[in-house]
Amino acid sequence: MIRSIVFPRVAGKSLEELQPALELFRALGFAPGNEWHEGGNYGIEMLAPSGGIEFLAAADAPSVDAMVEVSDADGAWQIAKKLGVTIRREIADTPYGARLFEVEVGGLRVGFLTYAKKAGEHRGLEASLNAAGKQFAIVVSRFNSFITERLLDGALLALRQCGANPKDIAVVHVPGAFEIPAAARQLAQTGGYHAIVCIGCLLRGGTLHYEVIANEVTRGVGQSAQDTGVPHAFGVLTCDTLEQAIDRAGLKAGNKGFEAALAAVEMASLRQQVAEHVASAADGKR
């Protein structure tokens, strides 16, 4: 039976012309899905956490090819403007209570909106992808640098697209993945960073060395985050083959450094929101 639904849309005549659309959707948190190419044609899925078909009763056709619900329309608006996307409709409130804007990228018309909360409705805390005014550290392994440098480029791109000032991003290089947790902990303990992005690449070999290092790095990064309270994003690849690593450093499976940086931004924002929520609740009890 039904597993998913995809609406194909032509957004360019070449892979290069697809890049603006892919860049926008990746910056807003879409995950890369299946990819295919045949002759000179390419198809790359960009997957949302959920989706559906909307049936309309209207005299006119919809003004967009796709409508995307986001957690923060204003935050998405800022990202679209930074990327230089063509704006078809400025962000504004709608008569039905949503916050909406529309863009055109690669010939594709897309609307982004956030539905207003209904009276009495509480959806809980949900962070935005807003890195403005926050400090980030990236710990990157030099081992397998031909992969980790690509991951680093993806992480830096994500942070910039989310509004981080390049001066607020510290990049720290360590020899290998095993050294990442120690460096990440030291940076977190300074209290000067809102989140740490950990980047490395481990490739399976013919001994137990891979399993030992992978387990220790995972445990160390998680323990550092728990002990310091500073969010740590895990961008360490653990792959069976070099081809798998290349795919995850910017090809078929996207760029995991980019995704890790987005997670760092969201968790940094969430940590700030939780602190503000607790402080507000405490003031309300006084």
Image: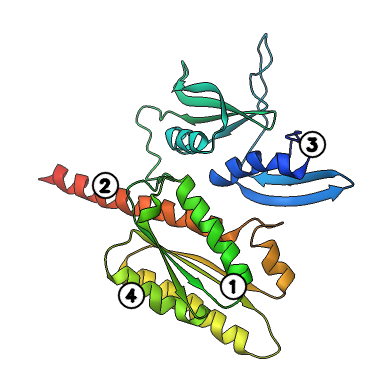
Mark with earlier residue (2, 1) = 1
Residue 258 location, quadrant: bottom right
Task: Name the kind of residue labelled 1 in the image.
Answer: Ser
Q: Relative to residue 90, is residue 25 drawn left or right?
A: right
Mark closer to the chain start, 1 or 3: 3
Which of the two marks, 3 or 4, is nearer to us in this view? 3
Tag 4: amino acid: Gln
**Which element is circle 4 on?**
helix
Do the CB atoms of the residues marked 3 and 2 lie less than 8 Å apart? no
Q: Nearer the viewer, residue 85 or 195?
A: 85
Please state which of residues 22 and 142 is positioned toward the viewer in this rendering. 142
Element at label 1: helix
Q: Is residue 238 above or below residue 53?
A: below
Q: Which mark is residue 145?
A: 1
Residue under numbered circle 2: 277
Circle 3 residue: 13
Marks 4 and 3: in contact by CB < 8 Å?
A: no
Judged by depth in the image, the label closer to the viewer, 1 or 4, is: 1
Locate residue 53: give its quadrant: top right
- Residue 271 visible to the viewer: yes
Whole-number angstrom distance, CA of label 1 to CA of label 3:
33 Å
Mark 3 and mark 4 lie on one chain; the one further toward the N terminus is 3
**Disc nearest the viewer among 3 and 2:** 3
